[in-house]
Amino acid sequence: MPSTLRKVVWRMLIIAGVVFIAGVLVWLEFRPEGLGDGFASGNGRIEATEIDIATKQAGRIEAVLVGEGEQVEPNQLLARMDMKVLEAELGQARAQVRQAESATRTAQAQVAQRQSEKTAAEAVVLQRNAELSAAHKRYDRTRALVARNALSRQQLDDDLASLESTEAALAAARAGVLSALAAIEAADSKVIESQAAIEAASATVDKLEADLEDSQLRSDRVARVQYRVAQPGEVLPAGGVVLNLVDLTDVYMTFFLPERQAGRVALGADVHLVLDAAPQYVIPANVSYVSSVAQFTPKTVETASEREKLMFRVKARIDPALLEKHLDKVKTGLPGMAYLKLDDTLDWPDELKVNVTP
């Protein structure tokens, strides 16, 4: 009897062990992975917006004033192009402006002279009008006296000749006024032409001054030099790249989420980043972009189950105020993890609470 009891006990123990092991295996198979359905995560790398510092016009590089890895500030001079040709062209354009201004003054003086001539011609017309009136009166008196035989016929002929001569002189004076008006119009045209020449030459000066300013390559933001693409002495075409910068105020991590999670991510949602190089820090970020088109999972997503799915690209941008406080520590290319909270009613786990603040 005791032997039979022992066998029964052993059988029960074996069955219980099998059930326990089966339960453990089932739990391991179906247990929730990661942080649960209320959270999403993806791996990625820290990236930053890249800016190419390029030439506006073809030319030779005179100097490159920064090196790779150097931090630059807004409006800092980074490189300088050879400006000898532009400076010579600017000198020529300024001389053309002075020449056009001199021509304008000359044309304005000619206008004043022609106006004086017109005034004088108009005075001559008035004088000839007065002479013609006197000649008419004299001729009328002479004709009346000749009719009464008080004067000779010769006197009447002389007065008629004088009248006709005065009429011709008046016509000539009026023609002089018209000629003066034409001369004034011609002088005015020269003034307009010379003023247009001033405007054209001034526009050329402005363009060359802008080209000279553009020949001094400057940074428009806080950035770090990533590559020196060209060296002093090299001749570059228009648009040739001299330096490549990374914008230290626009840093982000790109990662990928499956469709069932990406659809629940809103722009501006909080993202917590943990970098492999500094796992003790949790960095705050915000969703700035969610792809509207699914794509095949890239090789950077490492698990086999995730590679079988279509994924959506998500970009999490780090707060610029935080970056500005730690510019010397900003590094691109660092791998890490991005965590998102899909359920607003849940709290962040202690290990994912932000511990880096602006």
Image: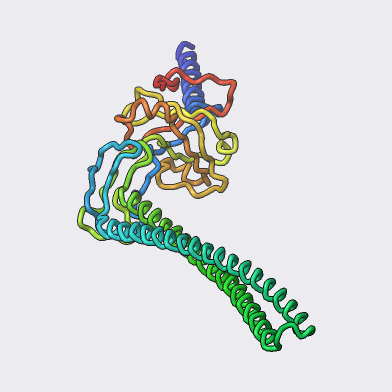
Location of residue 86 by image quarter: bottom left
**x, y (%) of residue 170?**
63, 75
The answer to whether residue 22 is visible is: no
**x, y (%) of residue 254?**
44, 40
Number of marks present in the image shown: 0
Location of residue 235 by image quarter: bottom left
Q: Residue at x 22, y 50 (%)?
A: 63
Give the camera-side residue of 240 and 276.
240
Give the camera-side residue of 130 and 244.
130
The answer to whether residue 243 is visible is: yes
Q: Residue at x 31, y 52 (%)?
A: 215
The C terminus - image quarter: top left
Location of residue 333 by image quarter: top left
Q: Residue at x 41, y 47 (%)?
A: 299
Give the camera-side residue of 301 and 236.
236
195 in relation to 17, above or below: below
